[in-house]
Amino acid sequence: MTEKISRRTVLRRAAFVAVGVAVGSQLATPAHAAGSSPDPAHVRDAIKKAQEREKRVQTGIPSKNGWEMEKVADDHGSIYTRPVTGLPVGGIQIRMADVETVLVHVVRRFHYEIDALRGGDVVGWVKPGSVRKGLPESNLASGTAVRIRSGSYPAGARGGFYPMQELTLRDILADCEGVVRWGGDDAKPDESLFYIDVRPGDERLGTVAGKIWDWNHTPGLGSGVLVDTVQPQRKSSADRLAAQQS
């Protein structure tokens, strides 16, 4: 039987092959072939630089959802300024890879289906000292959360969205299958906040990110394609997740 392989799987395998070729080419150099040992001074220097870089970036303190908060962005850590394709919001400082894929999907669907966003409307990473460590807002400092129009949806207040907007918001969360939580469902509401709600290493995050990645590379799917949020199956899924997260 022929195995069906998704575009995502093919491209990921191609990337692994490319990395393997690059590594193999390095191992094939005369120095490696001769079995020469690396210069101890160079090794010590590399280790020292890595330790200094880790000290500069890492805090050793997890945010509310278990991801490590980082002191800086765009500086050899896990958090970088990433574009949001098709939106005039500029770049967002966010944890790369699966977290980025999922949260950018949330931002893009918000823009296309709830309300158009402009520059400055979306904030990602913030410095650890600017958030309260035991609250969901701390997830911003680990690059695993975004705020959308915080001035329009002040913390502590409910009811910032019209019913049809909230219906779409619930559908967006259902897309994410529980790996994203809306701050509006927290005991102290924060309706501008959306954050990753699984811990590092949880396989569900990779599964959802892979699904969204496939959507983004398939015409007629993904954010920017309007969906019927009142379609019974979609609404049922959204209502079920809302009951779990509320």
Image (spheres, rainbow, N blue to C red):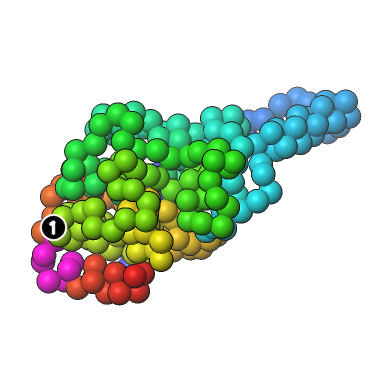
Three-letter code, disc 1: Met
- Depth order, front residue of 146/48: 146
Residue indicated by mark 1: 164
* Furthest residue in direction right, as rendered: 40
Q: Is residue 224 left or right of residue 13?
A: left
Q: Is residue 28 left or right of residue 210?
A: right
- Which residue is painted at 24% across and 61% down in the image? 170
Q: Residue 148: percent from the left, percent from the top?
A: 32, 43
Disc 1 packing (10 Å; few <14; some 14–19; many ≥20): few
The quadrant where residue 236 appears:
bottom left
Q: Is residue 133 left or right of residue 197?
A: right
Whether the magenta-drawn stretch holds residue 230 is answered as yes
Whether the magenta-drawn stretch holds residue 2 is answered as no
- Which residue is painted at 31% across and 36% down in the image? 121
Q: Is residue 103 above or below residue 3?
A: above
Q: Residue 29: percent from the left, percent from the top?
A: 71, 26
Secondary element at tag 1: helix
Region rendered in magenta = 229-235
Q: Residue 153: percent from the left, percent from the top?
A: 30, 48
Q: Is residue 166 visible?
A: yes
